[in-house]
Image (cartoon, rainbow, N blue to C red):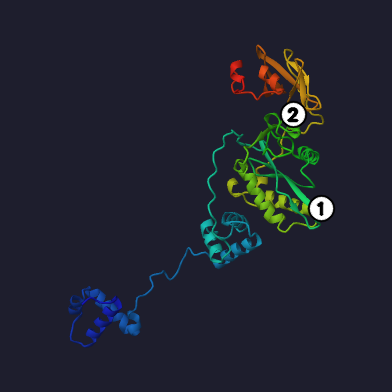
Amino acid sequence: MPWKSKVEQRRALIVAWETGRYSKSELAVAYGVSRKTVSKWIGRYQGGGRESLEDRSRAPRTRPTKTSDEVAQLALSLRQERPRWGADKIRAVLVERRPDMQIPTARTIHRILREADLVKAKRRPPRPRPPKTKLTEGTRPNQVWSVDYKGPFVLGNGQTCYPLTIADHHTRYLIACCAQTSESERITKQNFEKTFEEFGLPDVIRSDRGRPFGSTGILGLSRLNVWFLTLGIRPEHIEPARPDQNGRHERMHRTLKAETANPPEFDLLTQQAAFDDFRGDFNEVRPHQALGQIPPARLYSSSDRSYPRRTQVPTYPAHYKTRRVLKDGEISWKHHRLRLGSAFRGRTVGLCEVSDDLWIVSFGSLELGVIDDEAIALGRVLPRPTPVARKADLRLPH
């Protein structure tokens, strides 16, 4: 009859041995074990009684690699101090602060936080779609600045705050975070002027198409975009409904809201102070995973392109014809009025003839569109197809 458990088999073996009628060799044959095993269990029984016949834990008595209680407590304390930091950032800070201690891996720290019920499982977000529009890949500081407005929120005194944020795309350095009373072009431009004076000029400024960074005019350019162009900065727009194309900026916004507007301050002055404290911590202290767990300030440096006292006025070659954009955003061309958009009001554009009755319209080095018979009939400049080949290719479908 088969044994119900190994413990029962051991007990039966001891009972048979205590009768004195069987040798160890006979017991080994009868119970299907080796003579050495019979000796082991008899020895355990003699030393500890029937309880010693129970199964023993195979876990090691000591764990040389076990995280010390002191390190675990340091990790938990830092997490409580910085409740939005993950295991990677906590480990990076502990390694820097305590070089005398053996700091475990981020995975071990995450387990410590999970066992202390300080982290919750998160759903993995969907993978972003590849952009249709080719965006500039910032590979050095000040090559691309990203800019956006964090969603407005109401302060303690009932006033609405509109946070304008500007960040360096390559280093994640938060260049500016301004508490504004509105999203007006005038206030936004004033804050950009202050930022340019302190940090210099970038090559590209990336934004969505919302005002004041975009418009319904030609190429979606706003007056603010045109001002950027006069400074030698190329405006770049992400596609509509594609915030993932500016994902690192959106991620920063989530942290900004959690740490400065939950709850919000009483007024704009105290809210701006909270933004300034956040900028200092975000840039100087907070480790960033994409940067190898170092703060952005260690990688960022101001631009070597200083902010000019006067903006550049576009000049055009001698063979170009020029037109000044009128107050209503239109230019006069061959006794017709063609609309460019109010963003270019008061600016001078150049027109270059590339074939019979086909003209390219440019603002500085930026080509805005084309003029042909269709454009004159419609009263507007047509977006330029790529590449411009024949006049027939530029006709709008009937």
For badge 2, the amino acid type reads Gly
Q: Residue at x 81, y 29 (%)?
A: 310
Q: Which residue, given by chain and number where applicable, does mark 2 sit on? A: 341
- Sequence order check: which comes first, mark 1 or mark 2? 1
Above or below — where is 84 with respect to 289?
A: below
Answer left or right for 214 relative to 87: right
Any part of residue 378 in sight? yes
Horizontal relation, residue 302 to residue 16: left or right: right
**Tag 1 secondary structure:** helix
Disc 1 and disc 2: Cα gap in Å? 37 Å
Work out whether residue 24 or residue 181 is closer to the camera in this orientation and state it: 181
Q: Residue at x 63, y 61 (%)?
A: 78
The residue to which callout 1 is attached is 269
17 vs 179, nearest the viewer: 179
Furthest toward the front, the residue is 398
Q: Residue flagged by tag 1: what amino acid is it?
A: Leu
Q: Relative to residue 290, is residue 29 depicted above or below?
A: below
Image x and y of residue 29, in percent: 18, 75
User: Mark 1 or mark 2: which is in front?
Assistant: 2
Name the residue nearer the viewer: 54 or 163.
163
